[in-house]
Image: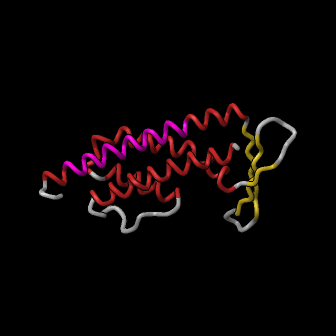
Amino acid sequence: MMCVSGLTLWAAVEVAIDNVNLTAWEVSGRTISNVVPQSLRWKIELFKKLHSKVAEFEHLRPLALEIIADLENEKDLRHFMAHAMYIASSRPGWLFHLTTFEKDGSLGSRSLRITKSEFDLAEDRLLRLGEKTVQYGEALIAESRQNSQKNGGS
């Protein structure tokens, strides 16, 4: 089913972001934030801060900026897949409906219709995003280990 595979891919991306954030957070001496966030929104914010303000990560910044842009581009689709209700439809594809709470306190709603081919493209983008994030994390971990060994760590 579309939602399950999409959410599984997102889970993999979020785990990769968590690993990168944790490593970067520790390397930075926990100077950017005193906590590691739980929600995707704050995970992305921590990723942005860590990878734009910490000098040790400057050479990795181009890849970090790509990852951040990809995360931002896919956030809405992820939100619908995770929180919206699937509505059966006679039209091809999937229809998702999401009830929202507006700033004025009223209820609102949003809908998203996605076709199989659109989802397939989104799935490919998520796979590439996951691969980039893992690649970034591996580079960060390797560098962290090298720096630790240079500084007499284990």
Give the number of callouts: 0
What's the magenta bit mostly, secondary-structure-wise?
Answer: helix
Task: Specify how the rendered protein is coloured.
Answer: secondary structure
Residue 149 in the image: x percent, y percent?
A: 16, 52
Left or right side of 19 for 78? right
Residue at the (35%, 54%) spot, across then down: 50
Q: Which quadrant holds residue 114? A: top right
- 107 in relation to 126, above or below: below
Left or right side of 58 for 21? right
15 in magenta: no
Closer-to-camera residue (127/84): 127
Indicate the quadrant containing the N terminus: top left, top right, bottom left or bottom right: top right
Residue at the (31%, 47%) spot, across then down: 140
Indicate the quadrant containing the C terminus: top left, top right, bottom left or bottom right: bottom left
Residue at the (31%, 41%) spot, across then down: 60
- 137 in relation to 125, above or below: below
Residue 108 in the image: x percent, y percent?
A: 76, 59
Q: Which residues are magenta?
A: 125-146
Residue 118 in the image: x percent, y percent?
A: 67, 34
Left or right side of 148 for 26? right
Residue 92 in the image: x percent, y percent?
A: 81, 35
Residue furthest right as drawn:
90
Closer-to-camera residue (64/93): 93
